[in-house]
Image (cartoon, helix red, strand yellow):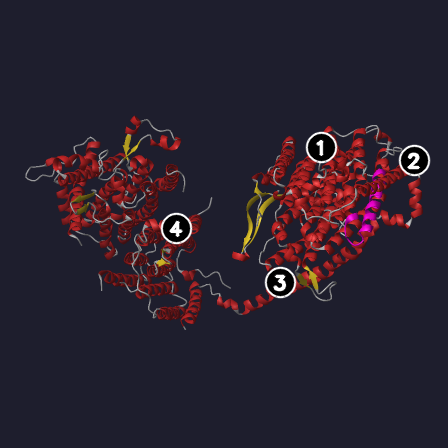
């Protein structure tokens, strides 16, 4: 059921344009033998996404023109699933809705997506392998954009799930894009399988919601309907066996919210399902930027925002969200400190920042989370793409131990990278500063159990973030060059098509923060005609549940910001000291730290633990028991062959005589049957 | 059964079987002679009077009646004897639904000049026509003669093939006239339409008034020209006369299905062919040439023109006579056309006949249905 | 007893006799087919009496005009003069089949003992081609489409089965 | 009026005659014809029942007659394929005796 809203038929084109391009590429790849000219591929892919961005902008403008309470654009294509009649009628529409939340997301996805598409032209330019990788890449990229937009614009959970699975698939395809390397294929599978765990929980959540709404007499999976009934849902419980924790009655809303959150964890790489994201860096760098930094991994954050009413009704679940987010943030930040692969550092940084977003959401700061999501999309995409430019310049060398002193050689890349680092580190005035501030304010003012600790974690993470980002920056661009001699002279900035999108992103990384300028700073501009500075939060407000209003005095906010900035600056200076002034020091510290260092460097052995606890037993059980025992022995041996043998025995010795080959004998038997039937009827 | 029906039936039987059919044998000989630059039949005489050889039909009948009726050895006697009857009867009774005049009102009495007028008149003709096939097949089978059987075989294949085309080719016609009732169909053709009216309908350009006078009779042949050609072809093939005389094919299979027939039974086959010629002529006239309608002069126009002078009753009567004459004039024209075709075209080869049916006429007739539907939709505003 | 009832019994008798003639005539397949034509025509007559005119017309057009002609065509094409088959192998089964068929008949006729309602008068224009056409192209349009597909499949199938060699 | 019991009865009789033909005749063509007879018997029942309830809920219904038309269509298709089979059978075995066709057995 589609709730009331302004109909806008333009909406469908936002996802459909990239789909059209993807379908074109798919057809060309699958059915046409000859390679498509590159300019066709480029024009179609980039053009479709850019056009989709334009449509999104137009739709956004239309949305802004509406009254704040009725900001909802609807495009109902057709009834996708229809079942039941009367009161029990259920229908899932193929409908797209644009409300403030999805508008922000759609703009980020198409906007950043367009830039990354353009960037990919340069990045993938040297891909001349015979499987037509260039076109294949753009096909997947377009398909991803389509899926992501379906996810974002869906008006119901089931349609969202379609997009959800679609982005998962594209992520898998793109991580393993260079599939000839077994490791890449392995990483793709890992991402896919870990995501399955989350998806399973998500699916269970959908079923639970549907079932509960059906019990309430209004079966639906549309967000609007769930929201309408959320107060009734809050009273429901699920009976579980008494031996289960918190049994025998679980609150339905909490369960659903937790299921959804597990799904979000999978997609957004939160503890304990974060293990796939660092490995996902095996894919091409534009993919890391688009999928594994800017858009797909934020789907979980988006899901929680979408269902904010549900989480608001389930404080326990919210607390879990906050704590998981906080722990992930600091956990990933510590790991990032020790990594030496440029993309791995960024990957852990992404995990950490996603943790931030969840922290905000758990604390009720949904608009803060979305704000951070947006700014993070800009600066993390920028960082990844700049890192990609570095990697290109280094001829696909990713180890920062082998870089250093690059600022002279590739100064354009250096500048944008620096902007990105400043933004993520939260340098005052940059976008990250404001959004991180909002997150911390949300944590500080929330009523989640232990919110002071969460705040402390947030601040500490901010310091760590600044430290590892500057570490990365100094390792790569400053200090002594560790690049091999002969390579050093041939290094230069990547092609303009690679660099220009970075400038655009750099611009937004600096200034995007002013879209959601907290009131505390907005007041500074009061004299300039700025009345309400926090326009993003005001824009999002009506679509989200009212957060717990933070009535902080401005001075508190300034103090908090100051503390954060101080910590961040400390981190930055520390990095400078350690990696520029005294380059020998880190090694000594690492040696001194010993076990702790190794623990952190090896990512707390999470992968190993999973391998030992889950993967290996599973493989062993599958092989020994399920394959050899059940499949080969029971199903093949007893059921299939045994049945066949039994039937052969019966048929060969007796039944075959019934098959005389004489048609009329068969007819006779048929007649006998008819007589029996009719006789029974007339008895 | 009302007397009126009996009178009408007797009238049509008299005209068709009594007058047209026997004369047709003579007409055919004469026409072929004219076309081949000969004199033609002129020898039979009664006391020296020849009147253009018109006694030949009489002589033929006498000859056929008096000849021995042979049933060959090994033949299935009953079937052999029944076959000519089954061939002839459907031809005669199809005439029951063909209107030879409109409905006339004489005071309180309404006289409709058609023997039977069911809603499904056209279907009736098709149904009856399909029965006629059996005569040929039975004749071919029961004669216990290979030539006959080959003829019967050819006839059965040819006739069921062309039946399909025949039915489909007139679908366009009854789409246009929106009826299957033959009297309604003739009535619908008693009007005219603007020749350039399509300009108005398609492009919305109103025609100048003087062009409104450029009118054609609303006849099937003008609104469904393709259907006319196809229907005439198909129904002539149904009749198995040259150029579609594969079942007889005297140069190939002696005389086909009636090789073993003699005397009046052969005569019946012969007659049924001629009667069918008349039925075809009447049917084509009704479907495509407006039946009894006089072009540009509708029934009301005629009655309206005469009645002030001579009174309504007389005017109606005069109109009736004019209509019946018009109808038979058209029938004669169509008979002439068939004769001309029969003597102009050589016989097809068997595969050509089949190709013509399945590969040319059938697709064309289906296309005709489509196009007709499209045009009708356009004219009716496309709101269907 | 009105004329239509008399006609009904006449047609019924004709139908039964000719149907029996078809089944019992073991010497001449063509005669069997022709008997079947008589049955068809008699049934068409009964349809007319039951005021199903369109059905009657199609019964004659399709059954008598096309289907049985096709049978005859095949019989003549294969030149099956008489059934000179080898002695049968299943006399007993056939005898049993006859008995059982008669049991079926008894059972079916037993079903009929309950009185059926009198046929009501028909509304104006009932069963005309217009009404049948409208019903066909509205309520039953899917059926029409599907049967069109079926006919196409049958044409192709028949062609392939009867063709001597493909290609 | 025509007693409808007798219409249905006639239908039953014709049906059983068809069954007899299918069960006892060995000529494949006659068997096909008997099947046609059975279909016709069913058609007769359809028309009879249609005549019995021509108006349902105040609306004229033609379901019975439409079904007959469909049965006729199906019969035509069936005959086309069936006779195709007969022809190819005759070509291979030089007979249309159904007892000749008993290869498909143990």
Pinpoint the chain carrying mark 1: A
Q: Earlier in the sequence, mark 3 or mark 2?
A: 2
Pinpoint the chain carrying mark 3: A
Front disc: 3 or 2: 2
Q: Which mark is residue A529?
A: 1
Determine the CA span between mark 3 and mark 2: 73 Å
User: Which is nearer the eye, D8 or A343?
Assistant: A343
Pinpoint the chain carrying mark 4: C
Q: Which mark is residue C136?
A: 4
Q: Residues within 10 Å of mark 3 (few under 14, many from 20)?
A: few
Q: Residues within 10 Å of mark 2 (few under 14, many from 20)?
A: few
- Residue C165 magenta-highlighted: no
Q: Residues within 10 Å of mark 1 (few under 14, many from 20)?
A: few
- Within the image, what quadrant is residue A282 found in? top right
Q: Earlier in the sequence, mark 3 or mark 1?
A: 1
Magenta stretch, overall SS: helix
Front disc: 3 or 4: 4
Q: Which mark is residue B323?
A: none
Q: Which mark is residue A640?
A: 3
Front disc: 4 or 1: 1
Residue that carries the numbered disc 2 in the rendered image: A581
Determine the CA span between mark 3 and mark 1: 80 Å
């Amino acid at each position: 059921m589609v709730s009331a809203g302004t109909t806008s038929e333009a909406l469908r084109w936002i996802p459909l344009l990239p789909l059209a391009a993807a379908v074109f590429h798919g057809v060309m790849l699958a059915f046409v033998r000859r390679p498509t000219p590159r300019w066709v591929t480029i024009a179609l892919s980039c053009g479709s996404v850019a056009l989709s961005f334009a449509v999104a902008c137009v739709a956004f403008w239309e949305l802004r023109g509406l009254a704040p309470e009725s900001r909802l654009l609807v495009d109902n294509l057709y009834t996708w699933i229809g079942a039941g009649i009367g009161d029990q009628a259920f229908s899932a529409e193929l409908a797209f809705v644009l409300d403030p939340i999805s508008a922000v997301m759609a703009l980020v996805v198409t906007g950043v997506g367009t830039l990354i598409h353009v960037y990919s032209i340069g990045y993938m330019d040297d891909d001349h392998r015979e499987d037509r990788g260039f076109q294949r890449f753009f096909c997947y990229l377009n398909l991803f954009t389509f899926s992501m937009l379906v996810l974002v614009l869906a008006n119901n959970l089931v349609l969202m799930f379609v997009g959800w699975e679609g982005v998962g698939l594209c992520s898998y395809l793109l991580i393993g894009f260079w599939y000839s390397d077994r490791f890449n294929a392995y990483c793709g599978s890992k991402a896919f399988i870990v995501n399955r765990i989350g998806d399973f929980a998500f699916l269970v959540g959908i079923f639970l919601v549907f079932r509960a709404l059906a019990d309430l007499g209004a079966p639906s999976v549309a967000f609007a309907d769930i929201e309408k009934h959320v107060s009734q849902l809050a009273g429901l419980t699920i009976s579980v066996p008494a031996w289960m924790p918190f049994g025998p009655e679980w609150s339905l809303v909490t369960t659903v919210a937790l299921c959804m959150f597990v799904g979000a964890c999978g997609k957004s790489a939160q503890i304990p399902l974060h293990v796939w994201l660092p490995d996902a860096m095996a894919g091409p760098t534009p993919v890391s930027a688009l999928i594994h930094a800017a858009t797909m991994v934020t789907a979980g954050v988006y899901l929680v925002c979408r269902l904010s009413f549900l989480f608001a009704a389930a404080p326990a679940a919210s607390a879990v969200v906050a704590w998981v987010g906080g722990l992930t943030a600091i956990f990933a930040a510590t790991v990032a400190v020790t990594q030496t692969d440029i993309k791995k550092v960024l990957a852990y940084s992404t995990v950490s920042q996603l943790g931030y977003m969840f922290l905000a959401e758990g604390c009720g700061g949904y608009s803060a989370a979305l704000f951070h999501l947006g700014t993070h999309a800009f600066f993390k995409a920028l960082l990844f793409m700049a890192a990609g430019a570095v990697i290109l310049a280094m001829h696909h060398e990713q180890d920062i131990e082998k870089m250093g002193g690059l600022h002279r050689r590739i100064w354009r890349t250096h500048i944008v990278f620096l902007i990105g680092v400043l933004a993520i580190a939260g340098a005052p005035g940059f976008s990250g500063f404001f959004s991180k501030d909002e997150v911390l304010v949300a944590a500080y003012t929330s009523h989640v159990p232990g919110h002071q600790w969460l705040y402390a974690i947030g601040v500490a993470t901010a310091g760590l973030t600044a430290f590892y980002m500057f570490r990365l920056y100094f390792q790569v661009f400053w200090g002594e060059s560790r690049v091999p001699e002969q390579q050093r002279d041939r290094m230069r900035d990547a092609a303009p098509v690679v660099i220009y999108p970075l400038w655009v992103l750099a611009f937004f990384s600096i200034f995007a923060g002013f879209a959601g300028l907290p009131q505390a700073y907005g007041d500074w501009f009061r004299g300039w005609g700025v009345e309400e500075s926090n326009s993003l939060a005001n824009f999002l407000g009506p679509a989200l549940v009212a957060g717990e209003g933070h009535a902080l005095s401005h001075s508190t906010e300034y103090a908090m910001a100051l503390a954060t900035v101080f910590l961040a600056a400390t981190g930055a200076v520390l990095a400078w000291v350690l990696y520029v002034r005294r380059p020998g020091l880190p090694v000594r510290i690492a040696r001194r730290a010993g076990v702790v260092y190794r623990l952190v460097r090896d990512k707390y052995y999470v992968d190993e633990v999973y391998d030992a606890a889950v993967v290996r037993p599973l493989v062993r059980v599958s092989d020994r028991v399920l394959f050899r025992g059940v499949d080969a022995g029971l199903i093949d041996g007893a059921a299939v062959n045994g049945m066949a043998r039994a039937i052969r025995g019966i048929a060969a010795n007796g039944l075959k005589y019934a098959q005389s080959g004489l048609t009329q004998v068969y007819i006779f038997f048929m007649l006998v049957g008819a007589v029996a039937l009719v006789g029974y009827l007339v008895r | 059964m009302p007397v009126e029906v009996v009178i009408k039936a007797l009238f049509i039987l008299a005209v068709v079987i009594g007058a047209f059919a026997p004369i047709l044998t003579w007409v055919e000989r004469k026409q072929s002679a004219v076309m081949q630059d000969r004199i033609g039949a002129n020898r039979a005489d009664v006391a020296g009077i020849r009147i253009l050889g018109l006694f030949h039909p009489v002589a033929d009948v006498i000859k056929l009646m008096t000849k021995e009726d042979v049933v060959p050895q090994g033949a299935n006697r009953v079937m052999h004897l029944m076959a000519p009857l089954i061939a002839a009867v459907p031809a005669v009774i199809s005439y029951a639904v063909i209107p030879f005049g409109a409905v006339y009102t004489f005071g309180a009495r309404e006289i409709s000049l058609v023997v039977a007028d069911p809603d499904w008149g056209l279907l009736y003709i098709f149904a009856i026509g399909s029965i006629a096939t059996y005569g040929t097949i039975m004749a071919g089978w029961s004669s216990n003669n290979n030539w006959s059987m080959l003829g019967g075989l050819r006839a059965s294949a040819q006739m069921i093939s062309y039946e399909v085309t025949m039915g489909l080719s007139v679908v366009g016609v009854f789409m246009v006239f929106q009826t299957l009732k033959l009297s309604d169909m003739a009535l619908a053709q008693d009007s005219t339409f603007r020749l350039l009216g399509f300009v108005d309908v398609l492009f919305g350009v109103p025609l100048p008034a003087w062009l409104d006078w450029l009118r054609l009779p609303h006849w099937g042949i003008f609104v469904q020209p393709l259907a006319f050609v196809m229907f005439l072809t198909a129904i002539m093939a149904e009749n198995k006369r040259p150029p579609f005389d594969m079942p007889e094919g005297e140069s190939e299979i002696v005389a086909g299905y009636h090789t073993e027939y003699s005397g009046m039974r052969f005569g019946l086959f012969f007659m049924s062919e001629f009667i069918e010629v008349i039925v075809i002529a009447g049917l084509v006239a009704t479907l495509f040439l407006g039946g009894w309608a006089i072009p540009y002069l509708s029934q009301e126009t005629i009655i309206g023109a005469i009645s002030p002078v001579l009174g309504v009753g007389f005017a109606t009567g005069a109109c009736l006579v004019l209509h019946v004459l018009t109808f038979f004039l058209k029938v004669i024209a169509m008979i002439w056309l068939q004769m001309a075709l029969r003597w102009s075209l050589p016989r097809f080869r068997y595969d050509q006949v089949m190709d013509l049916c399945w590969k040319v006429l059938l697709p064309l007739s289906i296309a005709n249905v489509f196009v007709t539907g499209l045009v009708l939709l356009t004219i009716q505003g496309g709101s269907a | 007893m009105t004329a239509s009832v008399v006609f009904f019994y006449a047609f019924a008798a004709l139908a039964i006799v000719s149907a029996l003639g078809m089944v019992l005539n073991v010497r001449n397949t063509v005669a069997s087919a022709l008997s079947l034509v008589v049955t068809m025509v008699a049934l068409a007559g009964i349809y007319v009496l039951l005021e199903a005119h369109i059905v009657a017309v199609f019964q004659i057009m399709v059954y008598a005009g096309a289907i049985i002609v096709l049978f005859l065509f095949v019989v003549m094409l294969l030149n099956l003069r008489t059934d000179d088959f080898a002695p049968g192998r299943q006399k007993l089964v056939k005898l049993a089949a006859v008995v059982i068929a008669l049991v079926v008949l008894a059972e079916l006729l037993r079903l009929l003992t309950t009185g059926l309602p009198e046929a009501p008068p028909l509304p104006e224009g009932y069963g005309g081609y217009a009404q049948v056409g409208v019903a066909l192209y509205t309520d039953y349009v899917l059926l029409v489409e599907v049967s069109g597909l079926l006919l196409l499949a049958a044409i192709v199938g028949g062609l392939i089965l009867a063709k001597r060699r493909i290609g | 009026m025509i007693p409808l019991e007798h219409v249905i009865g006639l239908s039953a009789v014709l049906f059983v005659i068809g069954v007899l033909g299918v069960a006892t005749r060995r000529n494949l063509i006659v068997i096909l014809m008997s099947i046609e007879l059975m279909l016709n018997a069913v058609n007769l029942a359809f028309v009879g029942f249609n005549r019995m309830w021509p108006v349902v809920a105040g609306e004229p219904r033609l379901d019975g007659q439409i079904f007959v038309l469909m049965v006729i269509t199906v019969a035509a298709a069936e005959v086309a394929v069936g006779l195709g089979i007969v022809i190819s059978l005759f070509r291979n075995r030089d007979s249309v005796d159904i007892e000749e066709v008993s290869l498909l057995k143990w």
